[in-house]
Amino acid sequence: MAHAGTTQPVLTARGAGLRGCRTCGKANPAEAAQCLRCGSALLPEPGLQAVWAWLFAGMVVYIPANVYPMLRTLTMGRMQDSTIVGGAVELARHGSWGVALIVILASVVIPVAKFGIIAYLALAVRNRWPMRGNSRHHLYEIVEFVGRWSMIDVFVVAILSALVKFSLVATIAPGIAAVSFALSVIFTMLAAQSFDPRLIWRSTDSKTA
Amino acid sequence: MMAGMTVADSAGPDLVACPTCDALHRVGSVPLGARGRCSRCGTVLAAPRAGAMTRIVMLAATSLVLMVAAVFFPFLEISAGGMTRKSSVLDAALAFSDGLTLPLTLAVAAFIIVLPALRLGLIIYALAPMALGWHPARRAVPAFRLAESLRPWAMAEIFVIGVAVALVKVGGLATLHFGVAFWAFVLLVLVNVLNDNFMCRLTIWRTLEQRSRS
């Protein structure tokens, strides 16, 4: 099996005057606007505009997600709002360090890291920063894989709200931050999806057909 | 196993442009049971397997049956202070159904029920005729394309992990019992992971193209 990670110039579909399809891998003739095998749209030149747009949208809605309450807990007639970070702090204070860590990791560290990585990849492509090995490819794979998992927090809120409904004794209701957090995850996923990974490799493509 | 190639016939059926890095490869010679990877980025380009279609369709059908069970049977039961509450997956989706969080109901229902079910249905529609040795269905190509684009948005397995986290959160306050649907859902996720690992998308696309033509 060929070993991955070479930075030798490689002949690409683009270099050969063809259009590779990102869905099915077919090498289409250059004039094709749609893949001849699977019918996906083939863009002549992938850009970064959509990536930036989705990324900024994701970052903007991430702010209210942290400011407004994620969970509204009603215990013994007392209403308590908790934000994402506030909820984690509460958990830690009760001694559940592990869960608190998971919550912080899933809803703060990972989303912020994702913003950073996507922005870094897009900047690296735009400014043609030199690349060593395939570390950028790994970063891209991580973002692609991790993106959906941030939705855990929203599902946790949904499950808790569905389960804990004991009228005045204990009731949990979702807060508005759940909506903006979900939107932030969706926008970041769209940003990652609109990033064309072939751009990462442009600098090592062979220049002549 | 695979070599980068010099420009030859552009319409060659075993010519593959790596979907991740665009490097050109020939995959005609990958033997049954082996995996052909891109020489530059390591993406799997070909993984032909005997009876792959049949297995994929069987696993998708299994998932669909489990899905029905998972949605309609009680999922979790919680009891605290003499009160008991049963909750189904549907209840979890509907938790956001009042006020400003209403749109989230639709999204959550889509992520954990509608899209996974739709994706399974599309896979069965596109691949079952081929598994039986027939020609692919007439709309098999757009159906499988849609199934592929839905993949990141079908989040059933993430929901299961979410359940685990939620359990830890309420574990101290109340007693919990798992319902039938919980186990159905866990099985569903396992079957799905199995299926996704079994499926080499590029190989399926090539098979789909060949069978439609012949």
Image: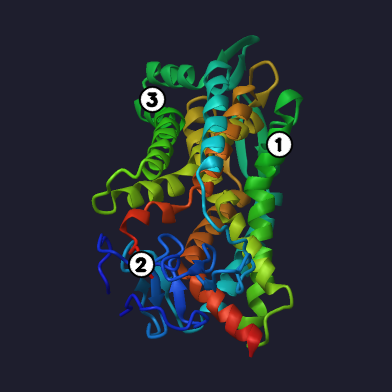
The residue indicated by pointer 2 is A208
Please, which chain is the residue tagged with disc 1 on? B
Q: Is residue B74 visible?
A: no
The residue type indicated by label 2 comes to: Thr
Image depth: mark 1 or mark 3 in front: 1
Whether labels 3 and 2 share one chain: yes
Q: Residue at x 33, y 54 (%)?
A: A203
Residue B97 lies, in percent from the top left, at 74, 31
Residue in view at x 63 percent, y 46 percent: B111
Q: Chain of mark 2?
A: A
Numbered disc 1: secondary structure: helix
Q: Are marks 1 and 3 in contact (CB under 8 Å)?
A: no
Secondary structure category for the residue under label 3: loop
Decide: few, some or many residues near mark 1? Use Cα within 10 Å; few <14, some 14-19, many ≥20. Answer: many
Q: Is residue A85 left or right of residue B126?
A: left
Reply above or below: B186 against A3.
above
Q: Which one is in front, A158 or B206?
A: B206
What residue is disc 3 on? A96
Image quadrant where residue A15 sits: bottom left
Q: Return the x and y of residue B71 as percentages of the image width and height.
A: 68, 50
Q: Can residue A155 be seen by looking at this rendering?
A: yes
Residue displayed at 38% across by 70% down: A209
Q: Are marks 2 and 1 in contact (CB under 8 Å)?
A: no
Q: Name the spot of residue A146 as percent of width and height, x first.
A: 44, 44
Residue where numbered disc 1 is placed: B105
